[in-house]
DNA sequence: GCATTTTGTCAGATTATCTGACATATTTTT
DNA sequence: AAAAATATGTCAGATAATCTGACAAAATGC
């Protein structure tokens, strides 16, 4: 049970912690930058990780980035990470093979 | 900013995480076993630490303890800890004194 | 037996949050 | 430049979440 990723924080606290408006928080969700859970009644629940994510997004927007830019950059980054991961797997495959005790 | 002690969790999530009823959670506060913060509007906000505390309290009650017993025991324990702390301070005082480089 | 402890429940009020829509200022695109 | 897209504010009306205070009741303590 990770305090950082468990989704337990309501909208009010999120706006307090981030300094953002409700409107902004919901808009960033609409743009698929954060993914809150919901209560049975439909209220959003965020994690501390989500809160940090929102602050990160807000900072970039203040720096002149646009939401699509942010997503585009992250798409590229994660693609690179995938490549790196594959390379790492290949390396370890070749490395573990000859290592025979 | 500690995820564990920051008071950000509402009543609904607390009852989910603890399995307790709202009634129980409020009663344990009335008996001064937990100390939630409040929003401007008056809603309670708990930390993960509070949630663990509530579970601990509930467990002891299930084991036949009564609330006054729990508080009494903790009063004694913290008194002992105060004593231990003082003893520790005295010890280190006497230890650091002769240690002259 | 009477008092205390702990929990349930219910009513009524207030706070918190939701969706959807319209407005708008500032870019970006064509 | 005109049109389109972006990001945010705001407002209304609805629903969900939470609060307090009170009464009831079962279990346990003294």
Image (cartoon, coloured by chain):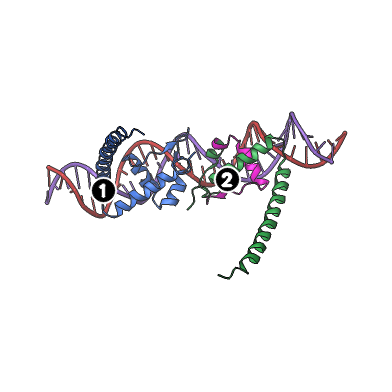
Chain colours: A blue, B green, C red, D purple
The dot on residue A33 is none
Task: Report the magenta residues as a range.
Answer: B16-40
| Residue on which disc 2 sits | B50
The x, y position of residue A30, in whole percent, is: 33, 39
Question: Is disc 2 placed on a helix, strand or loop?
Answer: helix
Q: Point out the residue furthest to the front here.
A: A101
Please give the chain letter of the residue carrying mark 1: A
The x, y position of residue B55, in whole percent, is: 60, 39
Residue located 26% across and 51% down the image = A65
Query: How many dots with numbers?
Result: 2
Q: Is residue B29 magenta?
A: yes
| Residue on which disc 1 sits | A66
**Residue placed most toward the observer, A21 or A4:** A4
Disc 1 crowd, CA 10 A, few/some/many (<14, 14-19, 20+): few
Please give the chain letter of the residue carrying mark 2: B
Q: Point out the residue furthest to the bottom here.
A: B100
Q: Is residue A69 magenta?
A: no
**Residue placed most toward the observer, A4 or A12:** A4
**Residue placed most toward the observer, B49 or B99:** B99
Question: Is disc 1 placed on a helix, strand or loop?
Answer: loop
> Which quadrant would residue B88 be assigned to in this image?
bottom right
**Cβ atoms at labels 2 and 1 below 8 Å apart:** no
**Residue placed most toward the observer, B27 or B67:** B67
Q: CA distance from mark 2 to mark 1?
A: 39 Å
Q: Left or right of D19: which side holds A11? A: left
Give the foreground label among 2 and 1: 2
The x, y position of residue D15, in whole percent, is: 47, 34
> Which quadrant would residue A11 be assigned to in this image?
top left
Residue located 34% across and 43% down the image = A28
The x, y position of residue A1, in whole percent, is: 49, 38
Q: Left or right of A60: which side holds B76? A: right
Q: Quadrant of the C terminus of chain B?
A: bottom right
């Amino acid at each position: 049970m990770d305090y950082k990723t468990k989704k337990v924080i309501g909208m009010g606290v999120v706006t307090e912690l981030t300094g953002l408006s409700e409107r902004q928080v919901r808009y960033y969700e609409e743009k698929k930058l954060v993914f809150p859970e919901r209560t049975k009644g439909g209220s959003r629940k965020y994690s501390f990780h989500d809160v940090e994510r929102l602050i990160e997004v807000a900072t970039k927007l203040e720096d002149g980035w646009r939401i699509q830019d942010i997503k585009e950059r992250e798409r590229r980054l994660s693609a690179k990470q995938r490549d790196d991961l594959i390379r790492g797997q290949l390396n370890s495959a070749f490395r573990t093979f000859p290592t025979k005790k």
